Every structure is written in structure tokens, then in C-alpha cells.
Image (tube, rainbow, N blue to C red):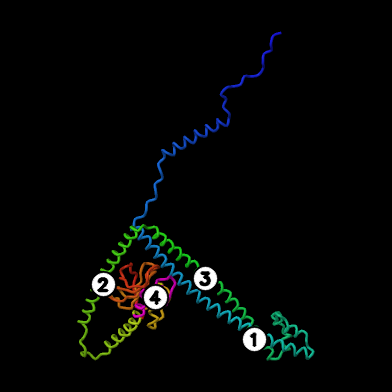
């Protein structure tokens, strides 16, 4: 009998499993990506700013912080003033309430008297009610009252209206106070943000870059010093010419010269006190929002110095610039206030010879410096 043929398929030799096929494809893909990455150009690093750009940026940040400091000072002053107003209104409202309660007790005594007399209705209802307003217009009830009782009711009416008005005014003032406090917080945050940016920028400088920045500052100070010397020469020449043109001592008897001299002497006396105070603060640190005695911001120093001479200046540079008489830079005298930048965010005290005493910026101390170190906005003579 012939043998039957087998139906089994022969085994395939060298068979590749699907897993192996996928792995090979993945390796090919990685190889291709690696080749592409190797040939791609590397990202260029961000160029570092020049020292001049850093100086400009830092100066700008400090200036912005100075502006925010004045906003903070303004908001703090407004908040303090509004708090005092609210406290006064709340006290007034409490006094009105006391008077109202006193009148209510008086009306209650009238009602009690009527109760003892047997005529409790309807007058007792009126006097003992929490809100007698609904009974005020009843002519029948008013007719039963004596003139003293009628006056007490009229007083009650008036006091009720006044108390309500004071409560409404106090509520409105509290809302204004809340707004002032919110502005205060915002200004404080703005100052802190700008100062943090400036410190961060400076901290990223290398030792060599810091040295170059210091050299730029020295050049800036030197140029400002030269301008101050030029102003001092001009002022000295003007004073000499004025002295030469003035009448000799004893040649005149009029009162005009005496009055002018007296006025000048009066201001000079105050200016001496201002500058004596300012000199005593040299070396103390600038702290934004500070008014002394251990630290100052710019307007805090000028205000404290002039207060030592008996003159009360406003808190901010924006208000101080409105006080007194405007003077030209060429006509500056010791004690005058010199303001800087278009936004009037800085101020110093002129000491003569083109120099001033001021609280410069965070990280610096109260010092003498040329008025030309910053762009001048204008100057005033406070008294």
C-alpha cells in the first residue's frame, strides 16, 4: 500500500518575529533623528546687554521706584487724613446717638406719666415705640401734648435726621478710606517690584562688569562736578557785580534797602537751620517712605530739614514744588529746593556752589552731590 503524503507545512527557516521588526524600525528612526539633530544649528545664546545699557536700565528702575515712592507717600498721607476724618465722624455719630437716646428717654418719661394718669392710649404707643416716626403727623396726638412735650418730639425728629446723616457720612468716608488703603498697598508693591528688578540686574554682573559700571558712575559724577563749579563761578561773579553796584554803607537813609536786607537775612537765617539739620543727616541711609530720624527718602529729608527751621512742607515732591517762589537755577540760594526729572520724582536741598544735600536712592546714604547729577526740573524758595 503506498504511503500517504504529509499535510504539514515545512518550518520556515530564519523567520523574523513582529517584535524584532518593530525594534529595528524604531532604531532606524532614532538614528535618522540623531543625524538630523547633529546637523541642526545650535540655538544662539541671548546677547548680554552692554554696561551702558545696564546703567541706563538701573537708573530707569530707580527713577521708577522714586516715582512709586512719591505715590506711596501721597497714598499714606491721604489714608492717615481719611482715618482721622472717619474717627471724627464716628465719634460725632456716637454723640448724636447719645442725644437721640436721651431724648427718647425723655419721651418715655412723658409716656409713663400719661400711663400713671390713665391715658395710655394712644400716646403711650407713640412714646414707647421703637420708631415713633409713623405717629408724628397725627394732629390729634400732638394736640394732647404740652409745649415742652412738643419741643421734645421736635428735637427727637431733628436728632434722628442728624444721626442718620452722620452715619451715612461715616459710611462714605470708610469707603474712601478703603480705597486709599488699596492705593497704598499698590504703590508699596510697585516700589518693591522696581527695586527687586534693579537688584537682580546688578547681581548678574561679573566683577569686571561691576568695575566698568563703577567707572561710568565716576565719569558721570565728574561731569556733574564740572558743571557745578561753572555755576559756582557764575554765581560768584553775579554776587560781586551786585556788591559793586550796591550803595556804600552809610550813604543812604531810605527804608527800602533795610527792608530788602531784612527779608534776605530772614531767609538766610532759616536756610542756615535747614542746612545744619541736613548736614547732620549725612551718612544716614535712604529708605523709601521714611521721614527720619534714622533714615529718609528724598522728600522726607527736605520736609524734616525745613521743619527744623519752622516751616511745614507737604509730604511729597509733587506738593513741595508748589510751595514758595520759583527761582531760576542761576539764582539759587542755600536752602532752596531743587527738583529733578520731568515727573518731579526727586528733590534735594541746595547748599551753594552748585551742590546739594539729598537722599539719593535705595542702597545709598544721604550725601552731598552736584545738582547736575540728574536732569533738573526746577527750583523753589520755600519761605
Q: Decide whether residue 280 is among the magenta residues.
A: yes
Q: Earlier in the sequence, mark 3 or mark 1?
A: 1
Q: Residue at x 78, y 86 (%)?
A: 120
Where does residue 345 sit, x and y in percent of width and height? Answer: 39, 69
Q: Is residue 23 left or right of residue 286?
A: right
Query: What residue is disc 1 on?
Result: 155
Depth check: 376 or 360 in front? 360
Question: Counting residues from the N terminus, which is met first, the one under dot 3 or under dot 2?
Answer: 3
Q: Quadrant of residue 86?
A: bottom right
Label located before the other in sequence (2 or 1): 1
* Element type at mark 3: helix
Q: Position of residue 166 (x, y in %)?
A: 59, 79
Which corner quadrant holds the C terminus? bottom left
Please name the residue that numbered disc 2 is placed on: 231
Point out which mark residue 181 bears.
Answer: 3
Does residue 27 appear to the left or right of 128 in the view shown? left
Q: Position of residue 88 (x, y in %)?
A: 55, 80
The answer to whether 284 appears left or right of 221 in the picture is right
Q: Rounded to the nearest whole Å, what is the CA distance between mark 2 and mark 1?
A: 71 Å
Query: Which dot, 3 or 1, sits closer to the camera?
Result: 3
Residue at horizontal 27 percent and vertical 71 percent from the top: 228
| Residue at numbered disc 4 | 301
Amino acid at each position: 500500500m503506498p504511503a500517504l503524503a504529509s499535510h504539514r507545512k515545512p518550518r520556515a527557516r530564519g523567520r523574523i518575529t513582529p517584535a524584532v521588526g518593530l525594534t529595528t524600525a524604531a532604531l532606524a528612526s532614532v538614528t535618522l533623528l540623531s543625524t538630523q539633530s547633529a546637523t541642526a544649528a545650535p540655538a544662539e545664546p541671548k546677547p548680554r546687554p552692554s554696561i551702558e545699557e545696564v546703567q541706563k536700565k538701573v537708573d530707569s528702575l530707580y527713577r521708577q521706584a522714586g516715582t512709586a515712592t512719591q505715590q506711596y507717600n501721597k497714598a499714606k498721607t491721604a489714608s492717615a487724613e481719611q482715618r482721622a476724618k472717619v474717627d471724627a465722624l464716628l465719634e460725632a455719630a456716637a454723640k448724636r446717638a447719645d442725644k437721640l437716646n436721651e431724648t427718647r428717654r425723655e419721651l418715655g418719661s412723658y409716656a409713663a406719666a400719661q400711663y400713671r394718669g390713665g391715658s395710655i392710649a394712644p400716646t403711650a404707643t407713640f412714646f414707647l415705640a421703637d420708631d415713633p416716626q409713623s405717629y408724628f403727623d397725627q394732629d390729634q396726638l400732638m394736640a394732647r401734648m404740652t409745649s415742652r412735650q412738643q419741643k421734645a418730639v421736635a428735637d427727637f425728629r431733628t436728632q434722628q435726621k442728624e444721626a442718620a446723616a452722620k452715619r451715612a457720612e461715616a459710611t462714605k468716608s470708610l469707603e474712601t478710606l478703603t480705597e486709599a488703603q488699596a492705593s497704598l498697598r499698590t504703590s508699596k508693591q510697585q516700589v518693591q517690584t522696581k527695586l527687586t528688578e534693579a537688584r537682580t540686574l546688578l547681581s548678574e554682573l561679573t566683577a569686571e562688569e561691576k568695575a566698568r559700571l563703577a567707572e561710568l558712575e565716576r565719569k558721570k559724577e565728574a561731569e556733574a562736578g564740572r558743571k557745578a563749579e561753572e555755576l559756582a563761578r557764575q554765581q560768584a561773579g553775579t554776587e560781586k557785580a551786585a556788591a559793586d553796584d550796591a550803595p556804600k554803607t552809610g550813604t543812604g537813609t531810605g527804608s527800602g534797602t533795610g527792608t530788602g536786607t531784612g527779608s534776605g537775612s530772614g531767609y538766610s537765617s532759616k536756610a542756615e537751620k535747614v542746612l545744619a539739620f541736613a548736614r547732620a543727616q549725612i551718612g544716614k541711609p535712604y529708605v523709601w517712605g521714611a521721614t527720619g530720624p534714622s533714615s529718609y527718602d528724598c522728600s522726607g529729608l527736605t520736609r524734616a530739614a525745613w521743619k527744623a527751621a519752622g516751616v511745614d512742607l507737604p509730604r511729597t515732591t509733587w506738593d513741595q514744588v508748589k510751595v514758595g517762589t520759583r527761582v531760576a537755577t542761576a539764582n539759587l540760594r542755600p536752602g532752596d529746593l531743587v527738583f529733578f526729572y520731568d515727573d518731579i520724582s526727586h528733590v534735594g536741598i541746595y547748599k551753594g556752589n552748585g551742590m546739594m544735600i539729598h537722599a539719593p536712592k535705595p542702597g545709598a546714604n544721604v550725601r552731598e552731590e552736584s545738582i547736575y547729577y540728574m536732569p533738573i526740573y526746577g527750583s523753589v524758595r520755600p519761605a
